[in-house]
Amino acid sequence: MEKLIIAGHEFNSRLFTGTGKFSSNEEMGKAVLASECELVTTALKRIEIDNPNDDMLAHLKAPHLQLLPNTSGVRNAKEAVFLAQMAREALNTNWIKLEIHPDPKYLLPDPIETLKATEELAKLGFIVLPYIQADPVLCKHLENAGASTVMPLGAPIGTNKGLKTKELLRIIIEQSNLPVVVDAGIGTPSQAAEAMEMGADAVLVNTAIAVADNPIQMAEAFKLAVRAGRMAYEAKLGGINDSANATSPLTSFLD
Amino acid sequence: MKVIINQKEKDICESMNIDELIKEERISNSGLAIAVNQNIIPKNKWALHLLKENDNIMIIRASHGG
């Protein structure tokens, strides 16, 4: 399998995972390891002064794991730039998953503020991975603004509805000069495999793994699906025909 | 003196620096970032940064998310 390269950094795995919604840090850590992902997202939050400590990072210490902080919770570009700088300080990384979704019901990303923030963060030396609507025109603007990937959604965050934006994802994959990471909405390993077969460079999966009855086994299922999908893409899928096309010789036996 | 920490008022000792505040409140510094009055204070400046009355302190930490 070809390696994935983002901003000059090589990844063996094309599955990115998140750390939300697990029932415990132990389970989260084991699922992340089972997924064999190399890039794992974290959020940032204000600590509670009466209960300030959480050892989640202790469960994400494997040497192959790189943390990708997100800007979830911000409402505009100004807040996103501030939080990205806080994230850089907190986690000592200039990689940032840029998420600006002011609407709390569908958590849909704001394209205008995302574009503004991408431009500014790229100038500040960040490796910016923006979470966006599956909008091919926006992807081109983000490319010019200095993004390092585009991360279009398959469906709204946490819905497990799959690749509802498939036709637009297809156009994005065709046109993008940046790695395309399908983020959000992927609910099953088969949907992840389908995104990879279409030529997505990677997928990010959190909810579908974390809320499974057995998140560790589901993480492994996604690992295999992403690998299978990518291998199929690289092997090049056969064409679709309207009429039957025999795979066995059509020998007449009773002539 | 009074300061605001993460939107809550708190009484702390006079002329305390950020390092001392973290130790006093028993906050582990793993995955932590701090801003005072919207200015991000790098970790290597925490011991030098004296807090003042009415400072607005934001303390964030890596947390669970996708």
Image (tube, coloured by chain):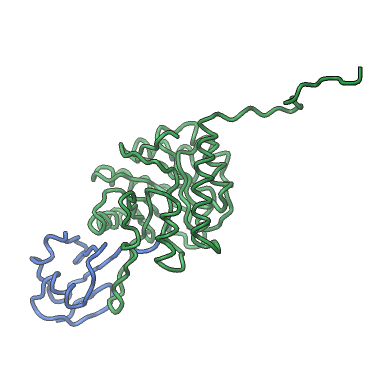
Tell me what residue is drawn at x 55 percent, y 64 percent.
A213
Residue B16 % position (x, y): 10, 75
Q: Report the residue that reaches farthest toward the top.
A: A255
In the rendered image, the quadrant that contains the C terminus of chain B is bottom left
Tell me what residue is drawn at x 76 percent, y 21 percent.
A249
Answer above or below: position of A63 versus A252. Answer: below
Count of labels in the image = 0
Chain A representation colour: green
Residue A23 shown left or right of residue A91 in the figure: right
Answer above or below: position of A96 versus B23. Answer: above
**Quadrant of res A178:** top left
Of the pair A162 and A85, the residue shown nearer to us = A162
Residue A64 % position (x, y): 33, 49
Residue B10 shown left or right of residue B16 in the figure: right
Q: Which chain is tinted blue?
A: B
In the rendered image, the quadrant that contains the N terminus of chain B is bottom left
Tell me what residue is drawn at x 55 percent, y 34 percent.
A232
Of the pair A104 and A209, the residue shown nearer to us = A209
Answer above or below: position of A76 versus A249. Answer: below
Residue A29 % position (x, y): 40, 60
Residue A9 % position (x, y): 31, 39
Residue A85 shown left or right of residue A246 in the figure: left
Tell me what residue is drawn at x 21 percent, y 70 percent.
B57
Q: Report the residue that reaches farthest toward the right.
A: A255
